[in-house]
Amino acid sequence: MITRLAPLGIALATAAGVAWWFAGPSGAPQMPQIAGPAEAQAAATEADFSRVPDMVRGDPDAPITVIEYASFTCPHCANFHRSVLPQLQEAFIDTGQVRWIKREVFFDRPGLWAAMLARCGDDSRFFPMVDMIYETQREWSASSDPAAIAENLRRLGRRSGLSDAEVDACLMDAEQAQAMVAVYQHHATEHQISATPSFVIDGERHSNMSFEAFSEILNARLGN
């Protein structure tokens, strides 16, 4: 089962410009005005890939490249991360056969905030933070109160070794949020991503699948 996205224009109207920051020690959020579809589309044409680089596991010279598109608030993405990805890591990524690229999808504000937290600090922190975010997804995303979700994410940031100041600086970075949404829009349009998790295996798009189904595709490409 997969999480379906709204049509891309609607998704961008919801996502573009939703970076928010803490008004003060109380943690009360302030929401900037959400951009409309025209502004969102304009931002998409100005994607700054140097500011939002691909996050990669595995040998850069591996014979197969897999791109994972996933949201941090998608339960099916969390399940894939917990149950399927570790098997793929052991069988294909760590053995040098697959280069794995993770790209974030944004169809709600908490998913964007979590991605901003994951990218907080140097790149070496990204995948450990991704693990923590998915492992605790039910806990940090459970509230209907945006401020409570934000505080839950701040706690995850502290658990990872970041200070409150570092976490707040990342979550307050509206320019980074806009850049991340623009890069997401570019990639999602390029690969026609309409659901999460989705995977692009050497240019061919696939929906969510089991380890066995994934292995069959990869082994066929490897000639095994």
Image (cartoon, rainbow, N blue to C red):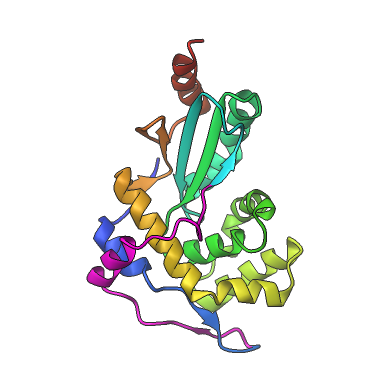
The residue lying furthest to the top in this view is: 224
Residue placed farthest to the front in the image?
Answer: 50
What is the magenta range?
26-54
Q: Position of residue 4 (x, y in %)?
A: 33, 49
| Pick the front one: 183 or 157 | 183
Nearer the observer, 31 or 80: 31
Q: Residue at x 68, y 54 (%)?
A: 125
What residue is shown at x 32% (from left), y 61% (from top)? Answer: 44
Using the image, determine if residue 203 lies above or below residue 115: above
The residue drawn where x is 30% and y is 50% is 189
User: Quadrant location of residue 45?
Assistant: bottom left
Residue at position x 68%, y 64% in the image: 156
Query: Quadrant of the image for the N terminus?
Result: top left
- Image height of 16 relative to 77, above or below: below
Q: Is residue 141 visible?
A: no
Q: Is 41 placed above or below 151 here?
A: above
Q: Residue furthest left?
A: 38
Count of numbered tags? 0
Instruction: Tell whether 11 sits left or right of 178.
Output: left
Report the magenta stretch's main SS.
Answer: loop
Residue 49, magenta (yes or no)? yes
Position of residue 195 relative to residue 161, above or below, is above
Q: Residue 12 in magenta?
A: no
Whether residue 118 is visible here, answered yes or no, is yes
Q: Position of residue 59 (x, y in %)?
A: 61, 31
Image spot of residue 98 (x, y percent)? 55, 28
